[in-house]
Amino acid sequence: MESTETAHEHPGGQAMAGDEAGHEESHAHPRYMLVWLWLALLTVAEVAIVWFAFLPRVWIVVMLLFMAVWKALLVALYFMHLRFEPRRVALLAASPLPLAVLLILAVMMEYR
Amino acid sequence: MAGAVTYYAGRAPERGLAVYTQKVGMWVFLASEVMFFTSLIGSYIILRFGASETWPLPGEVLNIPVTAINTFILICSSVTMVKAFAAAEVGDKRGTRLFTLATALIGSTFLGVQILEYRELLHEGFGPSSGLYGSTFYTMTGFHGFHVFSGVCCLFWASWKAFRGGYDNRAYKGLEVLGLYWHFVDLVWIILFTVVYLI
């Protein structure tokens, strides 16, 4: 989760970098088209990884999950404006995630 | 009502989340939706790992390129949704009308492609009763499709309201809350596309 956050900062950082002067303005309107471009590029990358399948299967799965989380974060932080909401709203939005992770991990323990 | 007044009499008003109530309501609903889809994905993991030797490889049954394009279509609809909200926020009624209707139409396109995909798969003999793969595939994509359908219905209603001038820089809450739902549906598809089609 930590690494995904860092990776996500990359496009976010770019999106915000140019708007340093008009800080308030950048909060009101993040660069939606830049986020759209990242989402499109990541989708192409996902399909390419599966299509050419030049990596071991485990690596393909890890990279796919990484990119899916990255895309989901882009949507949540910029399109759903979580980056610009009060922290309490972000906490409310994130509240089911520990339970979701717990459920998935519990289910996967079955096949360890 | 009188009871409520008595109950709260003499108490200092408590601080809320500093956002309007409808938005908090939508986020609470979306939190429950996260658990709904997680339970579906969890069941999928149990069933798939339990029968991994008979599970088809990615692209063997499902059409990845078509669904990738459909994923892109849904991402585009998220952009038009956010543009509709941004237009309403600054009081641009023409932009609000245009982008809300565009979102409804692009969302309908996604549904149309999904229906065609179902038709093609059913024609090839891959249905909800075609083993665990079939039942999990149709359950997950079907529930997501139902969410898209509900969203599209709301979007057409919102378009109608926008064309009547119902949204501006003072009345944009409905559009923002609908936007949150629509982006969530997009977000879930991003995860489902990876889990169901690519892995």
Image (cartoon, coloured by chain):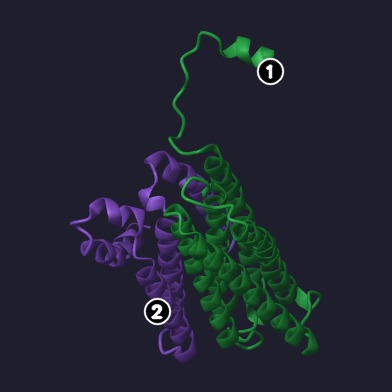
Viewer-nearest residue: B174 or A61: B174
Looking at the rendering, which quadrant does residue B98 occupy?
bottom right
Q: Are marks 1 and 2 in contact (CB under 8 Å)?
A: no
Dot 2 amino acid type = Leu
Looking at the rendering, which quadrant does residue A107 occupy?
bottom right
Residue displayed at 29% across by 57% down: A26
Element under label 2? Answer: helix
Residue displayed at 62% across by 9% down: B6
Q: Which residue is mark 2?
A: A41
Screen quadrant of the N terminus of chain B: top right
Residue B199 seen in render: no
Residue A13 seen in render: yes
Q: Residue B54 location, x and y as percent?
A: 68, 81
Residue displayed at 57% across by 60% down: B182
Query: Circle 2 marks a residue in which chain?
Result: A
Q: Which residue is mark 1?
A: B1
Q: Residue A17 location, x and y as percent?
A: 21, 63
- The hue of chain A in the figure is purple
Q: Residue B136 location, x and y as percent?
A: 70, 70
Badge 2 density bin: few <14, some 14–19, many ≥20, Cα 10 Å = few
Residue displayed at 71% across by 68% down: B142
Q: How far apart are labels 1 and 2 at the CA level?
A: 55 Å
Q: Is residue A67 left or right of residue B9?
A: left
Chain letter for the green part:
B
Query: Circle 1 marks a residue in which chain?
Result: B
Q: Is residue B4 above or below residue B79?
A: above
Dot 1 amino acid type = Met
Element under label 1? Answer: loop
Q: State the residue lying farthest toward the left.
A: A21
Say yes or no: labels 1 and 2 on the same chain. no
